[in-house]
Image (cartoon, helix red, strand yellow):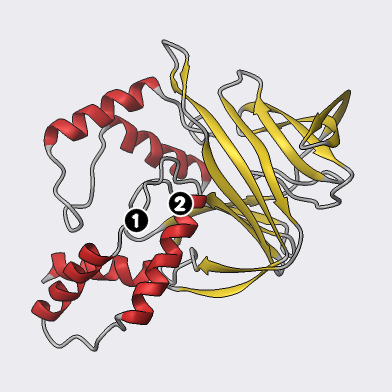
Amino acid sequence: MKKILTCYLLISAYVLHAQTIADYIVYYNFIFITDTVATTFSSPEEFKLLRVGQESKFAASAMYYNDSIMMAFKKDYPEPDFKSPKEVQTYVNLVTERVIRKSVRSNYKIIKNFQSGSVLSFAMYLSLPLQHMEEPMALAWELTGETDTILGLSCMQAVTNYGGRRYYAWFTLEVPINDGPYVFQGLPGLILRIVDDKGWYTFTATNITTDKSQVVIRNWMEDKSQKVDRKTFVQKTIAHKQNPTMPTSIIDFPEDQLLEQKKNFEKRFDLIIEQL
C-alpha cells in the first residue's frame, strides 16, 4: 500500500497546474559538457523562460509539454475518490499507459520572484519531499565593452560571478526585459546568451515572444516542499551522482543501468555542483 500511495502522490503532485497567461516566452538552446575528459558536448536542449505576474519560470520545454499532456489526461480521466489500493493501482496503470512523456535531459527548475527579489532552485533528482534552495536575485554585473549581434539584435556583454563560476552574458536593450536563462537577470535588457568562462555551459536564445500567450504552468512549489541551504542542496546532488538511486516506489532500476548512470556522472559536471 505504501508503495502504491507514494507513486500516486507523485502523480497527483505532478498535475497541480493550470492554464494562465504569460507576458513573454523566450526559447533558449542549452548545450552542456557531457565528458570533461574527452571534451564532448550535448546536442542542444530547448528551454523556455515564461513570465507570469511577478514570477518567471525557467525549465526544459519537454517539462512544459509533459505538464500539458498531464492536464489533458486529467480532463479526460478525472481522478476518482479512491476506496482501495487496487483502485489506486488501476489509476496509476492508466496514467502509465496513456501518458507518453518526453524525456527531460536537464531537470533544472528555476523560479525568479521579482517582487520578493528571490530565486528558487529545485532539486534536480527525484526526492520525497521535494527540496528547494532560495537565494537573493541580486547579481553584480560589470560591462566589458564587447558587443555582438544575436537574433538580429544588437547586444552588449556583461560579466558576473555566480556559484563559483564566472559567466559572460550578452543582453539587448532592444528588448527591455530584466530577465534571462537559468538564475540570470538584473541587466537593462533581455539576456540572449550566457556562457561560463570554461565554455562548459551555454544558453542561447532562439526565439522571443512578447505577445501575451496562454500557457500551462505547473505548481512546482508543492505544500510539502522543504527549503534547504546551498551546502545541503549541493551535497545531496553530489551524493546522488556518486550513488545514483531511484525511489523504489516508482520503478525498480536494473543495477547495470544505475552503474552506467554513475559512470556518466563521473565525466559530467552539473551547473549546481560548484555552487558551495
Q: CA distance from mark 2 to mark 1?
A: 8 Å
- Which mark is first along the chain, 1 or 2? 2
Q: In the figure, is residue 237 to the left or right of 259? A: right
Q: In the figure, is residue 243 to the left or right of 40? A: left
Q: Residues within 10 Å of mark 1 (few under 14, many from 20)?
A: some
Q: In the figure, is residue 156 to the left or right of 137? A: right
Give the residue drawn at x 69%, y 32%: 194
The reply to whether discs 2 and 1 touch (Cβ–Cβ < 8 Å) is yes
Residue sitting nearer the eye, 170 or 115 = 170
Q: Amino acid at mark 2?
A: Ala
Residue sitting nearer the eye, 129 or 101 = 101
Q: Residues within 10 Å of mark 2 (few under 14, many from 20)?
A: many
Tell me the quarter of the picture where residue 56 sits: bottom right
Give the residue drawn at x 76%, y 59%: 210
Q: Label for residue 101? A: 1
> What residue sits right under mark 2 in the picture?
62
Tell me the quarter of the picture where residue 31 sits: top right
User: Secondary structure beneath disc 1?
Assistant: loop
Q: Residue farthest to the front?
A: 152
Residue sitting nearer the eye, 165 or 175 = 175
User: Residue 63: x percent and y percent?
Assistant: 45, 54
Q: Can residue 227 be seen from the camera position used here? A: no
